[in-house]
Image (cartoon, grey):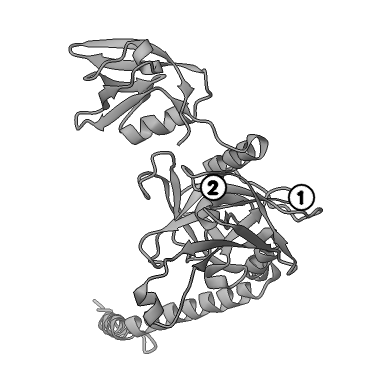
Amino acid sequence: MEIMIEKPATGGVSRKTVVLFCGLVVLVGLIVWPSLLGRIRYAQTRAELRAIRDAAMVSELSSVGKLFTTLARIIGPSVVNVTGVRRVQTYVDEITALRGGLPTGLVDESVGSGLIISSDGYLATNYHVVSQSEAIEVRLADKRVFQAQLVGADAATDLAVLKIMADDLPVADWGDSETLEVGEMVWAIGNPYGLERTLTYGIVSGMGRRGVVGNPYEEFLQTDASINPGNSGGPLVDVHGRVMGITTAIVGKSFRGIGFAIPSTTARRICEEIRQQGHVERGHVGLRLRERPAGGVLIAAVADQSPASMAGLRPGDVITELDDEYIDSPAMLVLMLTRLPIGNEVTLTVLREEDVIQVPIRVGRRPKE
C-alpha cells in the first residue's frame, strides 16, 4: 500500500501568517486612525472656510454689505434736524447782581429729529422736542433752514406736526408696524447730539411695551438700536426703508441697549388727525380703574353724567372683557377705549357680585387735557 503525503506549496501562505498580518493591520489602524481622522476633519473645515470666503466675494452677498448705505440714501433725505427755542425766565436779585450780571432771561434749545410726511412741507416729530417753544427751526438734508409752525400736538403720544414753507420734498414711506416680529432688524436715523443723519441698527427686542414712561395711551416698540438724545422724533425703519416707528424714549439718561419707538400704525394715524383738525380726539367713558390680581379691572369710581354712569356701571363692578376681548389691566382698557371712534357703542362684560352681565356703553369724547 502506498501512503500519499501532500506537501505544502512552496508559494502558499499559512493561516497563522494571515492572522498575524491582519492583527498587525488592525493595530496600525488603531494607532494611525485618530490622527488620520483629525487630518480629514481639518481638511473639511479648511474647505468650508474657503467656501465661505469665496461666497463672501460673490455679488449677492456683497450687495448685503451695501444695505446700510442704501438705507441711508433712501431714508436720509426725509430726515430733518429740529431745534426748539424756549426762553427761560430768571429773576434779578441781589445774588445775581453780586455775580456781575443782570439777566432778564435765558434761551434754552431743545434739539431733536423729524420726518417729512408730505411733499408740501408737513413734518412729524416728538412733542417734547418742540413743547413750549417760541421758535422752531428745521434744517433739511440739503442744508436749507426753515422756520416751522406748530400745526398741532398730542402730548399723550408725544407727537407733533410741523409745517414749513417748502415744496417737492422727499417723503418717507410709512410701513405697517403690525407686521413686525421680535428679532427683525431695524435701523434708527436721526441727529443724536447734533450729529446729523446718524444711522444705527439693531433688532426689534419687544412689542407692545406698556407703562414705559407712565403713558396709558401707548404701546411701544422696543429696540436695541442705539438711540441717544437728539434721536427723538426720527424714524425707525425696516430693511426696505419703510418707517416702522418714531423713536421717542430711552431707559435712563443715556443709551443702555433699551430704546423705544411709537409704532407706525399709531404715529401715522395721530399725525394725520393732527394735520386735518389740529388736535386728537379720544374715547372716554368716565371711569377710575384699579388693578385686580384675580383678573379684569376694578371700577373704583364713576364720574357723574358720564357714559359709564348712564350705562349703569357702579363702583365695585369688575370689567373682564370689551367686545369679547379679555382685559388684563387698566392700561389695556384705557388704550382700547381711547382708540375707539367717538359715539361708537361697545359691550362690556362685567362681573357684579355673583353675576356676569353684558353692559352696552356708548363712547364719549374725552375732555381736553
Q: Residue at x 43, y 43 (%)?
A: 219
Alpha carbons under labels 1 and 2: distance apart: 19 Å
Q: Is residue 244 left or right of residue 32?
A: right
Tag shown at residue 119 = 1
SS assignment at label 1: loop
x then y, percent, for residue 68: 62, 67
- Residue in the foreground of this view, choosing between 203 and 332: 332
Q: Is residue 128 visible?
A: yes
- Residue in the foreground of this view, choosing between 275 and 24: 275
Identify which amino acid the numbered label 1 is placed on. Answer: Ser
x then y, percent, for residue 196: 62, 70
Other residues around mark 2 within 10 Å, as few (<14) / some (14–19) / many (≥20): many
- Residue in the foreground of this view, choosing between 155 and 62: 155
Q: Residue at x 44, y 81 (%)?
A: 42
x then y, percent, for residue 342: 52, 22
User: What residue sits right under mark 2 in the picture?
Assistant: 159
Q: Are marks 1 and 2 in contact (CB under 8 Å)?
A: no
